[in-house]
């Protein structure tokens, strides 16, 4: 069973922080390739940060480097996204996704097209 459940979104002022959580089913987490994506109104979905839950290798979009940190808790089958220094342009619906095929791992996997399972999303709103 593939299941991804996000939580932790909300409203915050610019410069603030939020932490998103994504709990995955055992099957999904075992496939190792998970990530965070976002979609703002009128814009395409974009990759934010991804992590290989086996080796812990991470990749980030340039727009969030130095501000966001993706991590995992293998015991809880959870992928976290710590977001600091939030900006108004970070406002979006944030999704957790899994690539259950994942034949390779690299920065190109930030593209949403590789991910075949998605959570329901959690809204992040940053006011300036």
Image (cartoon, rainbow, N blue to C red):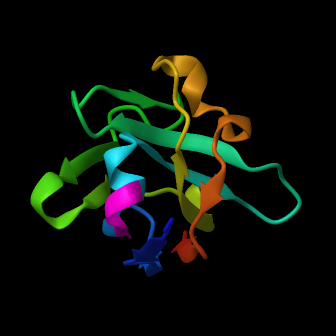
* Residue 11 sits inside the magenta stretch: no
**Residue 40 pos. (x, y %):** 74, 61
**Occupied quadrant, residue 90:** bottom right
Question: Which one is nearer the viewer's eye here, 14 or 46?
Answer: 46
The front one of 66 and 55 is 55
Q: Measured from the top left, where is residue 19 in percent x and y? A: 30, 67
Decide which of 15, 97 is in the foreground and name it: 97
Residue 47 left/right relative to 8: right
Q: Which residues are magenta?
A: 21-27
Q: Residue 8 at what x, y percent from top left?
A: 37, 78
Q: Position of residue 125 (x, y in %)?
A: 56, 75
Q: Residue at x 66, y 49 (%)?
A: 116
Residue 49, compared with residue 105, is above or below; it is below
Quarter occupied by residue 88: bottom right
Q: Is residue 55 left or right of residue 102?
A: left
Q: Residue placed at 61% from the left, 57% from the top?
A: 117
Q: In the image shown, does 87 or 101 lie closer to the viewer? A: 101
What is the quadrant of residue 128 in the picture? bottom right
Q: Count the marks.
A: 0
Residue drawn at point x = 74 percent, y = 50 percent: 45
Q: Is residue 83 visible?
A: no
Image position of 49 with respect to 106: above or below: below
Residue 23 visible, this orientation:
yes
Q: Residue at x 66, y 32 (%)?
A: 111
């Amino acid at each position: 069973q593939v299941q991804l459940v996000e939580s932790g979104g909300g409203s915050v002022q610019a410069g603030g922080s939020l932490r998103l959580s994504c709990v995955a089913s055992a099957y999904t987490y075992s496939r190792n390739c998970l990530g965070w994506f976002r979609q703002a109104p009128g814009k395409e979905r974009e990759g934010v940060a991804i992590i290989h839950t086996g080796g812990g290798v991470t990749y980030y979009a340039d727009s969030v480097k130095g501000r966001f940190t993706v991590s995992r808790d293998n015991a809880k089958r959870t992928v976290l996204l710590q977001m600091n220094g939030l900006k108004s342009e970070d406002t979006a619906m944030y999704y957790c996704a899994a690539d259950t095929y994942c034949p390779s791992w690299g920065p190109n996997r930030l593209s949403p097209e590789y991910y075949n399972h998605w959570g329901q999303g959690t809204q992040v709103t940053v006011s300036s």
